[in-house]
């Protein structure tokens, strides 16, 4: 094999290898959404929520997103269709975790109404 053939082969191989990495990195780079957001808290008033802080302390996205999609407005949409009951996420996800962590003596979030709703 002469030098030119080897060079051509190396160039072609690296293109193939490069292309095959694109879908892999596409899966790895999951959209984390907004770092902070305000949730609709109905008659009790809005709930300010630190999304990024929770991604760091909770780690598994599914703890929350098992109940609603990773899409802005998904929580309200799921309540409108009846897929989620009013206060279901508040009671079964947010408060369950905050109470358990508090009980275990770990760093936790608020458990009183006005500490979340404003
Ligand atoms: C403690 C609960 C919780 C955890 C854990 C969590 N999320 Fe979310 N996420 C939410 C809430 C609440 C919303 C807002 C949904 C809405 O607007 O109705 C949201 C919305 C989103 C959105 C939509 C864009 C936006 O900013 O509204 C994306 C994308 C998203 N999350 C990605 C993730 C990923 C990726 C992870 C894991 C690394 C994760 N989330 C972990 C609660 C959580
Ligand atoms: C850890 C934060 C947190 C605490 C503490 C909390 N809430 Fe909520 N609340 C939420 C979130 C998030 C929602 C929206 C999601 C849902 O409906 O599950 C909500 C929704 C609501 C709604 C609207 C439900 C609807 O769809 O019409 C009411 C009313 C409400 N909360 C009352 C209360 C009362 C009363 C208390 C105290 C006993 C309380 N909340 C404590 C986070 C909290
Ligand atoms: C699996 C556990 C877990 C779940 C689920 C969870 N939280 Fe928390 N939350 C925490 C922990 C731990 C902290 C304390 C983090 C810190 O201060 O470092 C916290 C802190 C908070 C704070 C105070 C943030 C600050 O420093 O100002 C609020 C408000 C809050 N959570 C709201 C919510 C709401 C609303 C939900 C539901 C949509 C929710 N959390 C779901 C574990 C959880």
Image: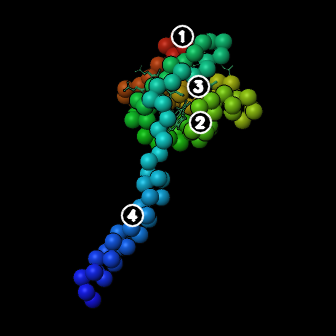
Report the quarter where the C terminus lies.
top right
Q: Residue pushed farthest left?
A: 3
**What kind of element bears circle 4?**
helix
Which element type, helix, strand or loop, lies under badge 2? Answer: loop
Q: Which residue position is annotated with label 3?
A: 90
Which residue is the site of mark 1?
118
CB at disc 4 and ligand 1 closer than 8 Å = no
- The image's mark for residue 71 is 2
Q: Earlier in the sequence, mark 3 or mark 4?
A: 4
**Residue 17 x %, y %:** 38, 68
Residue at 46 percent across and 25 percent down: it is 36
Q: Which residue is situated farthest in the bottom direction here?
A: 1
Spatial CA span between label 3 and label 4: 45 Å
Circles 3 and 4, Cβ within 8 Å, touching? The answer is no
| Secondary structure of the residue carrying numbered label 1 | loop
Rendered residue at 54%/18% (across/down): 47
- Percent of width and height locating residue 95: 53, 25
């Amino acid at each position: 094999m002469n030098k030119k053939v080897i060079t051509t082969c190396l160039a072609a191989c690296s293109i193939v290898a490069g292309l095959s990495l694109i879908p892999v990195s596409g899966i790895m780079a999951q959209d984390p959404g907004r770092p902070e957001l305000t949730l609709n808290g109905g008659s009790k008033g809005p709930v300010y929520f630190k999304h990024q802080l929770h991604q760091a302390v909770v780690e598994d996205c599914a703890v929350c997103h098992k109940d609603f999609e990773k899409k802005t407005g998904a929580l309200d949409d799921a309540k409108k269709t009846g897929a989620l009951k009013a206060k279901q996420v508040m009671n079964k996800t947010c408060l369950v975790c905050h109470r358990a962590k508090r009980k275990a003596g770990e760093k936790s979030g608020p458990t009183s109404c006005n500490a979340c709703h404003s």
